[in-house]
Amino acid sequence: MLPGSRLLKVRCINLLVVGFLRAQLKVEREAQGTMATPRPDLCNLLHPVILGQLARDWLQEDVPAFDYGGFVVGEREECAVLLCKSPGVLAGVPFFDAVFHELGCAVEWTHTEGTWLEPVTRVALVRGKVRHLLLGERVALNCLARCSGIATAAWKVVSQAKDTQWHGQVAGTRKTTPGFRLVEKYAMLVGGASTHRYDLSSLVMLKDNHIWSAGNITQAVEDAKRVAGFSLKIEVECRSIKEAREAAQAGADIVMLDNFQAQEVHTVAQLLKSEFPRLTVEASGGISEENVTQFFSPHVDVVSLGALTQAFQVVDFSLKITRGEGEDASGNSNNNNSVPATCETMPAPATSSIISSSIPETPGRRKFAF
């Protein structure tokens, strides 16, 4: 038994520590709340088989033959800490998970997808055989960095729309990277933007080359209706109010005002809405984060930006194998105490390929949903 005075001292110290940690957690939550609102869990949108196939394809592309570096490090169990080193929205968690799931590693997240991260923040811990950690490192980081970069760009534009109380939707475009579209479209959703059409089969969009080849807008819309039926909407890219009127009269559901000046968009959109109240009006072309607010007209329903997937800045992440409390593999000390640098609380690595759809019971800790 401890003497009374010593026991009282220990209790006081414990109370002070708990109070400090609670205050620190409150500050962190308030800071995150002013930056970005966490999005709902979107991972259920992703087909588990496709997700696993993507991870396998990426890993095979990165190591098509011998893993020389893996031979050097061997198969001892290690733990790595994921660090965010530049500000941005965390996105791409399911893809990161899928890569390491394929390699039999376990991932424990300490931040929820969709939250804003400030550097330097410990975001997750990954445990498994050291050669497997290094096999997945670059593939997983590439996905996370690009996905988070697009989500950050989308979140910034969506935030501007909310600040101006604009009623419409910010959308991406089909200007995505071949083979990487699923990741990029998912990132837009995490950032709060609309994905626009996912592919050529998701929406009938008639652009200038379609119209030129068909002869005119009316003919192009009539031909599209014949095959699209009732289930697909038809959008027509227009370069003038004359073309926009023709498209609306022919029965187009959406008219895109392409490469219009901002003031011209306001004028034309208002005229179209007065004549065709149910018409959806989209503004696109030459729109960026810097000038997007100029296109937030009360008569424009959608503003789309190719810049979300073509001009974004990646978020910088790194994965460091830990050797001891607060020390990474390079021997550098990290004083961020929000996440322990050890694997004592980590779950055991995945040893089964059984598909699980369980929901994590603890906020911030994910179970694989494959």
Image (tube, helix red, strand yellow):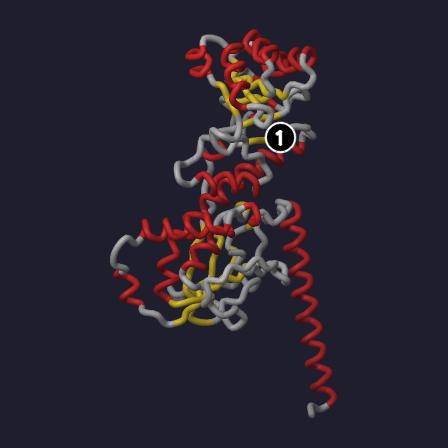
Task: Identify the residue at horizontal 46%, vertical 67% (top origin).
Answer: 349
SS at badge 1: strand
Residue 263 showing in the rendered view: no
Residue 28 pos. (x, y %): 63, 55
Residue type indicated by callout 1 = Gln
Q: Is residue 263 above or below residue 326?
A: above
Task: Identify the residue at horizontal 74%, vertical 89% (top origin).
Answer: 4
Task: Identify the residue at horizontal 66%, vertical 71% (top origin).
Answer: 17
**Frontmost residue, 355 versus 98:** 355
- Count of labels shown? 1
Q: Is residue 281 above or below residue 187?
A: above
Residue 188 pos. (x, y %): 54, 39
Residue 16 showing in the rendered view: yes
Q: Quadrant of the N terminus?
A: bottom right
Q: Residues within 10 Å of mark 1 (few under 14, many from 20)?
A: some
**Frontmost residue, 164 versus 70:** 70
Residue 36 pos. (x, y %): 62, 45
Residue 125 falls left or right of residue 160:
left
Residue 337 pos. (x, y %): 56, 64
Tag 1 residue: 169
Task: Identify the residue at horizontal 50%, vertical 34% (top origin).
Answer: 198
Residue 356 falls left or right of residue 23:
left
**Frontmost residue, 234 versus 313:** 234
Q: Is residue 307 above or below residue 77?
A: above
